[in-house]
Amino acid sequence: MAQTVTLIPGDGIGPDLTDSVKEVIGALDVGIEWEIAEAGEAVMDREGTPLPESVLESIRRNKVAIKGPLTTPVGTGFRSVNVALRKELDLYANIRPSLSLPGIETPHENIDLIIYRENTEDLYAGVEHMVGKHAAESIKIITREGTERICRMAFERSKEQGRKHITVIHKANIMKFTDGLFRDVFFEVSKDYENDFEEIDDRIVDNMAMQLVTKPNLYDVLVCPNLYGDILSDLCAGLTGGLGVAPGANIGEEIAVFEPVHGSAPKYAGQNRANPLATLLSAKEMLIHLGQSEAADRMQTGIEAALKNPETRTKDLGGSAGTKEFTQAIISNL
Ligand code: NAD
């Protein structure tokens, strides 16, 4: 049966990346039909908002979407469309796997980490204001409900996937109330899963950053409040080859939106230069979500074969191929 998926091409390199997804998924012939929904800078000029209601309606109707990155101007301009999308659709979990890939030289081998980042609260909620003219205040919000649902999802999915070590990340030594609540709720939820994991522990975020650089193989599943999850997942992207290879998924009760970890890299827009791998790996996660695991495996095989040959790798991975050539190499190896 055909499945309709909302596709947001996005800004900057976004359209190059989603074109690659359309081609590879088309070649897999899995009966996915795309409903294109425009958001971001171009729409802002035309419709006065970067996130028209029609985009949200399309995602609510189809329940599944894949998106290219959307630009957020620093300091002024519209608030982050990505953050707005996650809030509007209550996509409370941001799941970011980091897996070593063949042909990519990195300081550590056999990385297999997954970050569950809380996606709606924390300093990322952007509740901030000026206090008079010379001070600014940002309010960090952590709730029991928000923490419990991300922790439960992390435990449930990690148990299903047979993962054995789960770690909560915090700075509760300093932020005793907010991060203290996040850590406490994690350990409360963990009581239901004590027999499913070999290690259930916690790390302070600064120590975690150092350990991820020096001994990442000691870790497995990391559960983070929003801001630490954002920063550590870019660190983990660096462990497996950089932002060009890091996929992600935003998951709510009913809706899932898949997207790469990286941004819109405007300097490479339309130049056949961007690495589509992070978006393709996000599409692979989407296929698994849609129950198309066999197609997801075929896609992974095609990607690994294309990566093994330096001539078909993109420039950020030391190769010489453009977005299109890498895409064609994957298709010919499916
Ligand atoms: P960026 O991820 O766009 O770029 C960081 C660096 O990585 C740049 O050197 C870029 O050239 C490189 N890079 C990123 N993706 C690449 C790819 N696929 N192939 C090759 N090289 C790649 O981060 P930035 O410059 O901080 O942000 C640019 C814009 O993207 C900002 O407006 C930011 O707000 C937005 N952004 C959006 C998302 C999202 O849509 N979820 C996420 C992060 C940033």
Image (cartoon, rainbow, N blue to C red):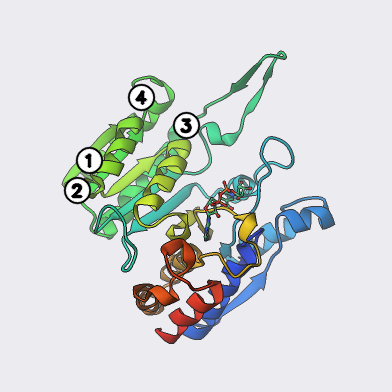
Q: Secondary structure at mark 3?
A: loop
Instruction: Name the N-terminal-most of marks 4 and 3.
Output: 3
Q: Nearer the viewer, residue 123 or 237?
A: 237
Residue matched to label 1: 200
Query: In which quadrant of the rendered view does residue 125 lie?
Result: top right
Residue matched to label 2: 197
Residue matched to label 4: 172
Residue 13 horizontal side relative to residue 166, left or right: right
Are there few (<14), some (14-19), or many (20+) residues within 10 Å of tag 4? some
Task: Give the residue drawn at x 62%, y 29%.
Answer: 127
Q: Is residue 269 above or below residue 83?
A: below
Give amino acid for label 4.
Ala
1 or 4: mark nearer the eye: 4
Q: Secondary structure at mark 1?
A: strand
Give amino acid for label 2.
Phe
Instruction: Name the N-terminal-most of marks 4 and 2.
Output: 4
Q: Secondary structure at mark 4?
A: loop
